[in-house]
Image (spheres, grey):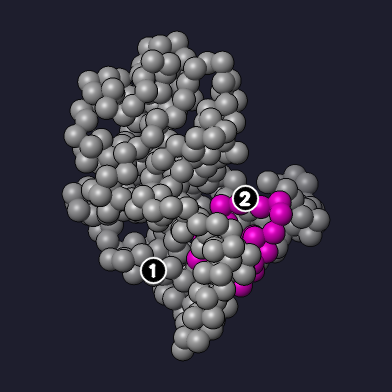
Amino acid sequence: MSSSPWRTAALVAALAAVPLGFAPAAAAQTAFDHVNRGVVELETATADGISPKIANDLADLVDDGATRRVLPVLGEGSLQNLVDLKRLRGIDLAIVQADVLDYVRAHKLQPGVETLPYVTRLYNEEFHLLARRGVNSVAELQGKKVNVDVPGAGTGITAAKIFGLLGIAIDPTTDSTSLALAKLERGQIDAVAYVGGAPAPVFRTIDAASGLHFLAIPLQPAITAAYAPTRLDAKEYPGLVPPDGPVDTVAVGAVLMAANLAPQSERYRNVANFVDTFFTQFSSLLTPGHHPKWREVNLAAELPGWHRFAPAAEWLARNAAVAQQPASNDMRVVFERFLDERLRLTGNTAMTQQQKDALFSAFRQWQSSQAP
């Protein structure tokens, strides 16, 4: 994470304020309070995914060196992040998978999890299923060894649901994804499942000569009812995906959750201050230099069955028009991707660019005619 000049200057000033040797108690307390002022701890997934980069983007956006600071903390995955958000001292925010939230609540794995508020829905995380040479379909994984990440990661929950819906019984292993990839290349396991925003850094260095390849997920009605259909393409994964053959898969939403904090507490005020800055300056995250997944974020998107962190809901109520209006170019990209996915799933003939242009123009005219 980069360090802004004013943040560095503030840190130097704080250190200079403490005299050498044994500082008096008052001076030591002042220095302690200064360093801890406005700190929000944000727990991410493991280093294999994109959430640490997302957290760094937020830290660079929010940190001012004096009254606000985001401290990213590497976690062990969505399931463990929820436990930490409920019970680990100091964790104020965490990034978790939406399907893990619902799973934990439905199976009563973490008492009181339903009281945790969400700040906003984030981006989609794609389900990756990487197989060894010789395994050419998901059906061929029946009874085979498939790694589903470490215990506490969200991949295990997503993989269990997807394989269950497909009626495929796998033999799950629970190594870290990095270790599992080494075993996959040696032929000790048959596939690696992983949920993470594409392109996931953990797959970046895999050589095409390894014979490893992504398997397509059959987009059956039961699957698309539970998860959003999407694709992995060669632009994201050169060498793992053929240039002319995107791989069908599904995606699960990532959510920024908050701890259940007392409204009058300092931590609550710190998180509220973070939310105000994050939401107000959100558009700057869409500029070059930040992770492209920010372009998938709609701050106003609801998370059915869960309640929003009050300061976030209040900000959205005050700024509804700003929050719900994506940039025109971003809307165009999303609209055309939606058309392509719908046409492919229904088996209809693909549209020409001229047809897409006309339909998008009609869509914008309809949108402008709607009441706010």
Residue named by callout 1: 302
Residue type, label 2: His
Relative side of 201 to 347, left or right: right
Nearer to me, 349 or 298:
349
Q: Which quadrant holds residue 147?
A: top left
- Marks counted in the figure total 2
Question: How far across and down, in percent of the image, does residue 329 sit?
Answer: 63, 65
**Secondary structure state at the residue bearing disc 2:** loop
Query: Residue at label 2?
Result: 291
Question: What is the chief secondary structure element of the magenta stretch?
Answer: helix
Mark closer to the chain start, 1 or 2: 2
The amino acid sitting under disc 1 is Glu
Labelled disc at residue 250: none
Based on the picture, tell me whether residue 294 belongs to the magenta stretch. yes
Q: Nearer the viewer, residue 203 or 305?
A: 203
Residue at horizontal 68 percent and vertical 46 percent from the top: 1
Q: Left of 105 or right of it: where is 344?
A: right
Residue 282 percent across, percent down from the top left: 61, 66
Whether residue 156 is situated above or below residue 186 in the rendered picture: below
- At label 2, counting other C-alpha atoms closer than 10 Å, the crowd grade (few under 14, some 14-19, many 20 or more) is some
Mark 1 is surrounded, within 10 Å at the Cα level, by few (under 14), some (14 to 19) or many (20 or more) other residues, namely some
Residue 166: x and y in percent read: 23, 37
Q: Find the residue positioned furthest to the bottom.
A: 371
Q: State which region is magenta.
A: 274-298
